[in-house]
């Protein structure tokens, strides 16, 4: 419906569906919220911010890699959540990395500060393990003792974080079934008996093993005409 206006327009009012704006229409303008008006409002945050207690518990892990001249000492401190209740649990609060090697000092400090900020923000922090694991060194990675492939020093830090999360219960480690463990151990002993060149290290896989694409461990051998991983059980034959 079209309405013709014959008089001169001296003012206007914006009409909306919001009751507060309709009530303020007599002033001719919509009300503007000020910082003082927001003090009593409910502020919703993505996570529960944590303040640092005077005392924290934690673990320190030592790692020695082929890409660093000196060992790295990684300290992860935890805060006790809901103490004295059935919901009591530990969660990481801060991380520090120390080493005599100053080559990586700048980015290590930056990484630990960002990780600590994520820890203190609250919420689920297990995604950090996958993010750190996905960092690859353009110069190439290296193999840890036991044959596990590590793509970068950052991924090694992710391995330490994963180990810590397993220990405090934030990540659940998937255990192999008893029959699968027995099968893999039998296959390993059979292979070592047939090949004199087997690696003599107690916890290492056979020297002729190749890299497993599933668990990134040099534990894949040819057994019964099929490629089988002695670490995770992955097999090309299903």
Image (cartoon, rainbow, N blue to C red):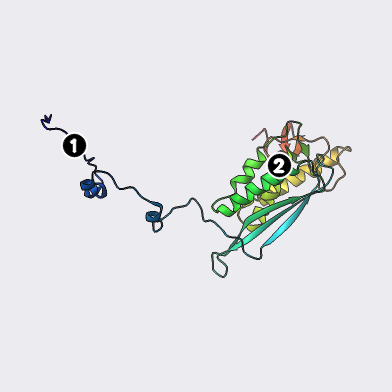
Q: Quadrant of residue 91?
A: bottom right
* 200 horizontally vs 162: left or right: right
Q: Which mark is residue 10?
A: 1
Q: Secondary structure at mark 2?
A: helix
Q: Position of residue 88 (x, y in %)?
A: 57, 65
The residue drawn where x is 18% and y is 37% is 10
- With respect to residue 8, does 85 lie above or below? below
Q: Is residue 20 visible?
A: yes
Q: Secondary structure at mark 1?
A: loop
Q: Classify the position of the C terminus by image quarter.
A: top right
Q: Position of residue 221 (x, y in %)?
A: 76, 35
* 175 horizontally vs 145: left or right: left
Neighbours of disc 1 within 10 Å: few (<14), some (14-19), many (20+):
few
* Nearer-the-camera pick, 211 or 227: 211
Q: How far apart are labels 2 and 1 at the CA level?
A: 63 Å
* 116 horizontally vs 27: left or right: right
Neighbours of disc 2 within 10 Å: few (<14), some (14-19), many (20+):
few
Q: Position of residue 21 (x, y in %)?
A: 26, 47
Q: Which mark is residue 152?
A: none
- With respect to residue 82, does 155 lie above or below? above
Q: Classify the position of the N terminus by image quarter.
A: top left
Q: What residue sits right under mark 2 in the picture?
A: 107
Q: Earlier in the sequence, mark 2 or mark 1?
A: 1
């Amino acid at each position: 419906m079209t309405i013709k206006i014959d008089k001169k327009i001296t003012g206007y009012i914006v009409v909306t569906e919001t009751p507060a704006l309709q009530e303020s229409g007599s002033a001719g303008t919509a009300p503007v919220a000020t910082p003082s008006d927001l003090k009593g409002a409910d502020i919703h945050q993505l996570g529960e911010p944590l303040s640092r207690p005077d005392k924290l518990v934690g673990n320190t892990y030592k790692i020695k890699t082929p890409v660093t001249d000196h060992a790295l000492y990684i300290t992860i401190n935890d805060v006790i959540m809901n103490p004295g209740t059935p919901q009591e649990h530990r969660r990481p609060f801060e991380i520090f990395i120390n080493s005599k090697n100053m080559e990586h000092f700048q980015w290590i400090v930056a990484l630990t500060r960002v990780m600590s900020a994520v820890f203190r923000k609250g919420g689920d922090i297990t995604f950090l393990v996958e993010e750190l694991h996905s960092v690859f060194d353009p110069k190439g990675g290296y193999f840890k003792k036991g044959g596990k492939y590590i793509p970068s020093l950052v991924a090694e830090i992710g391995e330490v974080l994963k180990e810590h999360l397993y220990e405090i219960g934030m990540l659940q480690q998937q255990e192999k079934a008893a029959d699968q463990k027995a099968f893999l151990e039998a296959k390993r002993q059979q292979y070592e008996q047939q090949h004199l060149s087997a690696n003599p290290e107690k916890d290492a896989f056979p020297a002729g093993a190749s890299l497993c694409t599933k668990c990134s461990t040099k534990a894949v051998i040819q057994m019964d005409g099929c490629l089988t991983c002695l670490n995770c059980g992955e097999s090309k034959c299903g």
